[in-house]
Amino acid sequence: MVIQYKCPDCGADMVFNSKTGKLYCDSCGHSEVIEDYEAQDFKPFEQHFHTTTFEGDEASQYQCNNCGAILLTDKDTTATTCSFCGSPVVLGDRLSGVLAPSKVIPFTISKKEAEAAFKKWCHHGLFMPRGFKQADRIKSLTGMYVPFWLYDVQGHGEAFAHCTRIHTHDEGDTIVTKTSHFNVYRKVDTRYSNIPADASEKMPDTLMDQLEPFDYGNMKKFNTPYLAGFISEKYNYTDKEMFSRIQKRVSDYMRDYISGSIVGYSSVNIVNCDCQIAQRSAEYVLFPVWMVYYDYDNSEYTFAMNGQTGKIAGSPPLSKSKITVSVVTITIVLFIICRIITILMGGTVL
Ligand SMILES: [Zn+2]
Ligand SMILES: [Zn+2]
């Protein structure tokens, strides 16, 4: 099922506007509120409905309602633009049933703002090569809704620690050290909400993790017009398949919490810590990401920007000469400081 948004006033394509959070017509300025917007009788939570797709092995074919061209899409694509007429297209059948997202964080950063923010970030890069800092080789900047699972989990943890408390006091000329030993036990029951894990095969996990935090306060009930004008993909991994990542992450949180609760000792050695983490629920959500592909020195660099906060993740190239100059400068400065201290010390001794 192909969903496209036509302006009721002039018939042009409407796209999501990151400033207003509404569907917007560039031609005449008409806008539509997205909450509770119903398009072409599309009900994302209905399991079965008629679609206009043609069956294929991997990628299905869709037809653009605007120009009639066949849209060739990747099997994971849920929103794209028609490569013939440029009309934004949302693929409804890939957003329904078990593939229906429950929530979405809409883009608040426009393409123009994303480009400006990326260039500014490059300009301020301390050790980036000069050619890279000019930021004039952006190959593409793509607004993409990335599928995530948002987990609500319950954790039960038990820990045993060996702790010491050391006291010293003087007895005549002797310093007496007294060490008391304690066996410390902690049992905690915790609950964590909204722990995200990206469910896309293509997106590097570390890059996506670095984009956190997202502001869940602005998360909206999912509706297809939010995707108009962007690329969107469906999840490749189910919440169950991704859960081991969450268990690892929550275990770390719990260990930190437990060790943070053992205070007032001279030393703390956690001998055994066992955390059981169970999934209470997981929501399928879409988060906004600007993907920046950048050409430099015959290599392609990939950066990701949080489409809600503007936070940038990725590893830029580093200038060896700049690093060398900095190291040499720091060494010289340290050498001079040492010399001054030596001279001053020498002065007081004399
Ligand atoms: Zn219009
Ligand atoms: Zn078209």
Image (cartoon, rainbow, N blue to C red):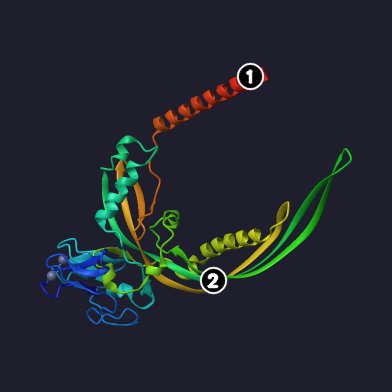
Q: Does residue 296 show up? A: yes
Check disc 2 and report its element: helix, strand or loop.
Answer: strand
Image quarter where the N terminus lies is: bottom left
Rendered residue at 26%/43% (across/down): 137
**Residue kind at label 1, given as amino acid type:** Gly
Residue under numbered circle 1: 346
Q: CA distance from mark 2 to mark 1?
A: 63 Å
Residue under numbered circle 2: 153
Check disc 1 and report its element: helix, strand or loop.
Answer: helix
| Left or right of residue 191: residue 80 | left
Depth order, front residue of 347/96 = 347
**Residue kind at label 2, given as amino acid type:** Val
Mark 2 touches mark 1? (CB < 8 Å): no
Say whether disc 2 or disc 1 marks the residue closer to the N-terminus.
2
Depth order, front residue of 43/131 = 131
Rendered residue at 61%/62% (across/down): 257
Q: Classify 85 as above or below 220.
A: above
| Left or right of residue 8: residue 322 | right
Crowdedness near tag 2: few (<14), some (14–19) or many (≥20) residues, C-alpha within 10 Å? many
Q: Classify 288 as above or below 282.
A: above
Q: Does residue 300 show up? A: no
